[in-house]
Amino acid sequence: MKYLILGAGPAGLSFAYRLFQKGESDFLILEKENEAGGLCRSKMVDGAPLDIGGGHFVDVKNKEVLNFLFELMPEKEWKKFERNSQIRIYNQYINSPIEANVWQMPIDEQIEHLKAMAAAGCNAGGAKPEKFVAWIEWKLGKKIAEDYMLPYNQKMFGENLNALGTYWLDKLPDVSFEETLRSCLERKAYGKQPAHAEFYYPKKYGSGEVWLRFAEQMKEKIVYGFEINELDVKKRLINRKYEAEHIVTTIPWTEFKTVTGADRDYNVLFQKLKYSSIVVDYVSEKLKTEAHWIYYPDLELDYHRILVRSSFSDGKGYWTETNSNRFHGEADGIKTFFNKYAYPLNTLEKPETIREILTEMKRNGIYGLGRWGEWQHYNSDVVVKRALDLADSLMQK
């Protein structure tokens, strides 16, 4: 066929449906699972949908993405929210981001945070460090680093934080002593809003519903239950069975156990790409909070955040998200779900590794797309945009 798409998650389905919209029918999607949606799949748990791959929300900013999604799931079926995310710290809940809401802390903690911010390297003119831990202290101050950012990232990504690069953190604004002092004096937040300051979530369904609708439109073009493990680069051949003019892969490169038809050993490159796994676990307890999700830096707790289902859907209770290395329960598939591939890790060598993979594969007509194809921590709305752009670009050739 002309286009072979690996993976029926948001990236693969968006790419395929863009082809479909423009009259291209010569494509096929291969999917390992028995239903579409990838990390954005939902299951009915305790009478309501639960997102088994963590929390997935659609940012309101990109109108092209929204119009694309609304074609199959109209806007009237979504509810719009102003983000309410919180952090459990100092035995209380404060709003996120932490640097904008220091004023909500006990007065003694406010003083300590202000002192640390004034001394932060980015404010005091110190040289930017190269290692992750020192960089966080330089950027946000020792207090935010030690009490929140470092333990939280340790819970999400693993014990050795200095194995991570700092290149992906440049989007963090410099912590402002002046703005923080002003917010403490005036008792209101200052600074930039975080991502998903406003977002959409389905009124009656989980995040997986929209992707089921996309899959239904192209059901004759999807092969389910097909585990991909072999790639012939030169022939653009998958598992010695499916051959294409273009291959678009949205699955993790590490899933290719055998790579042939190449002048080098790609598996050596693939194994340099690291990821973290998570367990999503449902709890029926009702929480007295209006927060949509809450971050927990406390190392005594296994999970790093919870999603309060009752705050953005009709379901009760909440679900926890825990790095699988910290989870002590059992993923039973009824209320607990294991996700092998949850977050691509931004290790020191990742930028060069993924650049090399994508550049060389593209020369052979193979394109990486989305969170796993590009090995970037993209949210689903960003993935949709990148899929539309790639489809438009390839169809113009």
Image (tube, rainbow, N blue to C red):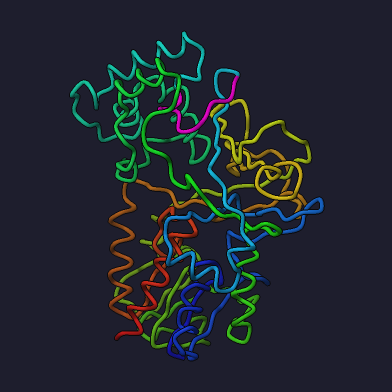
* Residue name at image x 23 percent, y 23 percent: 123
Q: Is residue 256 left or right of residue 234?
A: right
Q: Along the line of sight, which residue is nearer the eye, 65 or 329?
A: 65
Name which quarter of the figure residue 293 lies in.
Answer: top right
Answer above or below: position of 172 versus 3. above
Query: Residue 208 location, x and y as percent?
Result: 63, 62
* Residue name at image x 70 percent, y 42 percent: 318
* Residue name at image x 63 percent, y 42 percent: 307
Answer above or below: position of 53 versus 159. below
Q: Along the line of sight, which residue is nearer the eye, 231 or 217?
A: 217
Query: Residue 345 location, x and y as percent?
Result: 43, 48
Query: Residue 355 location, x and y as percent?
Result: 29, 61
Query: Residue 205 location, x and y as percent?
Result: 69, 59
Q: Is residue 368 left or right of residue 119?
A: right
* Residue name at image x 47 percent, y 36 percent: 153
- Provide the residue span drawn in magenta: 92-101
Which residue is the extreme one toward the right?
47
Q: Is residue 57 left or right of residue 174?
A: right
